[in-house]
Image: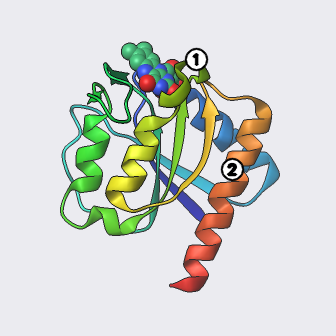
């Protein structure tokens, strides 16, 4: 089974988390994690198979709920999902952030979930702990299995 991930990582935390998850998958399963980092330089392309989005939170201003929220960093990933019918292949979102942001914790992921009508299947803070790696890995596999059986 291949778990496909599109992600964005401005400060490297998400990248680090995914590397740890790939190492975990190799030693604990036969699952392969195929992860692609989307950057400003990425060009829009069609997604041919189901994928997950791992997205950190970068918001500026407002309280993020009912007054002024501005997405400052993750737009390339948003645009890749929004391109043509790519959103139809998005089967789950994992949000990361920092709980010091209180109500805005993982708000970018929650906004993606609402906008693209996809479930937020998990969250973790910053680089995540070993427990987070295991928990999120299991959530991805479970969601992909459920999706595959239903479709
Ligand atoms: C300018 C800035 C704004 C942020 N805003 C939020 C926020 O609104 N909510 C939140 O949960 N985390 C917020 N964070 C924390 C990041 O989402 C967190 O550090 C994440 O691990 C960054 O991932 P990356 O290193 O892969 O880019 C913010 C971080 C920065 C630097």
Q: Looking at this view, is 94 or 102 the one in front?
A: 102
* Label 1: which secondary element: helix
Image position, residue 67 (x, y; %): 29, 29
Residue assigned mark 2: 137
Q: Residues within 10 Å of mark 2 (few under 14, many from 20)?
A: many
Q: Say if disc 1 is inside 8 Å of ligand 1.
A: yes
Figure coloring? rainbow
Callout 2 secondary element = helix
Foreground pick, 151 / 100 = 100
**Residue identified by numbered label 1:** 100
Nearer to the camera, 106 or 142: 106
Q: Position of residue 82 (x, y in %)?
A: 24, 55
Q: Which of the marked residues, 2 or 1, is nearer the chain's N terminus?
A: 1
In percent of the image, x 35 and y 25: which residue is there? 59
Distance from disc 2 to disc 1, alpha carbons, whole Å, reads 24 Å
Reply above or below: 7 against 30: above
């Amino acid at each position: 089974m291949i778990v496909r991930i599109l992600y964005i990582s401005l400060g490297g935390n998400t990248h680090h988390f995914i590397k740890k998850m790939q190492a975990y998958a190799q030693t604990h399963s036969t699952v392969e994690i195929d992860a692609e980092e989307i950057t400003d330089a990425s060009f829009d392309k069609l997604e041919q198979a189901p994928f997950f989005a791992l997205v950190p939170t970068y918001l500026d201003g407002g309280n993020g709920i009912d007054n002024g929220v501005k997405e400052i960093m993750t737009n390339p990933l948003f645009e890749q999902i929004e391109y043509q019918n790519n959103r139809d292949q998005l089967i789950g979102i994992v949000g990361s952030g920092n709980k010091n942001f209180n109500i805005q914790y993982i708000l970018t992921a929650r906004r993606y979930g609402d906008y693209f009508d996809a479930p937020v299947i998990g969250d973790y803070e910053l680089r995540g702990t070993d427990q987070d790696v295991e928990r999120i890995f299991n959530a991805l596999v479970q969601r992909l299995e459920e999706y595959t059986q239903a479709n």
